[in-house]
Image (cartoon, helix red, strand yellow):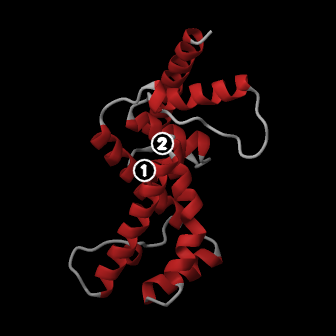
Amino acid sequence: MADEEKSLIKRLKRGESGALRSFYELYYRKVYSVAYRFFGDHHLAEDITQDVFLHLFERLARLRRGARGAQGIKGFRGESKISTYLYRVVTNFCINRAKIRAAHLSLEQIPEIKAGKEMVSVEEEEKKAQAQQALLGLSEGHRAVLILKALEGLTYKEVAEVTGLSQVQVRGRLYRARKAFKRKYDELTRRNR
C-alpha cells in the first residue's frame, strides 16, 4: 500500500477535516469507472458512485459515534489496498442495483458510447455499442469479474478479494464470462450486418 494511501486512511480514521474530500477526489474515478462499465449509463454510474461514497461516509460517521456493528474505513485493516476494498463495495452496489432493475435493457435503452473529443468512425461506434450491449447481457457475476479483471486491470488475487471468490473460482468464472461475452458479441455483430 502506498504511503499516500496509508496516510489518508489514518486521517480518515482520526476524523481529520478534509480527509473525506481527499478520499473522494482520489477514488472517485475508479468507483465511477466500475459503475459505468457495469451499466453503460452515465447517470446511473453517477448515482451509484454517490451512493457508494455516501454509504462509506455514513459508516465512518457511525463508527465515530460508537455505533455497534458499524463497518467501513475504520474497519479497514490495511491487508489489501483501499482500492480493492472500494472495488468490492462498488461491485456489490452494482450487483444489487442490477437485481433491482432485473429487466434486460433493449438496444434502444443502451446509451451510445462516445470516444471523447476525437472523431470515431461509425463502424467503431457500432463495435463499441455492441461490446457494451454484450457486456450488459452477461449475468452480474460474469460482468463483475470481466470488468474487474479485463477492464480495470485487477490481479486474480484482487478480483478474488473483491468478489469473495477463490482465485481458482475467479479464473473459472472469467473463462466462462469471456466465452459468454464472445458468444453475445458475435450474435450482435451477425445480427447487425
Closer-to-camera residue (17/172):
17
Image quarter where the C terminus lies is: top right
Question: Label 1, on which residue?
Answer: 91
Question: Label 2, on which residue?
Answer: 38
C-beta proximity under 8 Å, tags 2 and 1: yes
Closer-to-camera residue (109/54):
109
> Residue type at mark 1?
Thr
Tell which residue pokes out farthest to the left in this image: 68
Number of marks: 2
Image quarter where the N terminus lies is: bottom right
Q: Position of residue 88 (x, y in %)?
A: 43, 55
Closer-to-camera residue (173/180):
180
| Picture quadrant where residue 4 is located | bottom right
Q: Is residue 143 visible?
A: yes
Q: Is residue 102 above or below residue 23?
A: above
Q: Position of residue 188 (x, y in %)?
A: 54, 16
Q: Position of residue 46 (x, y in %)?
A: 48, 56
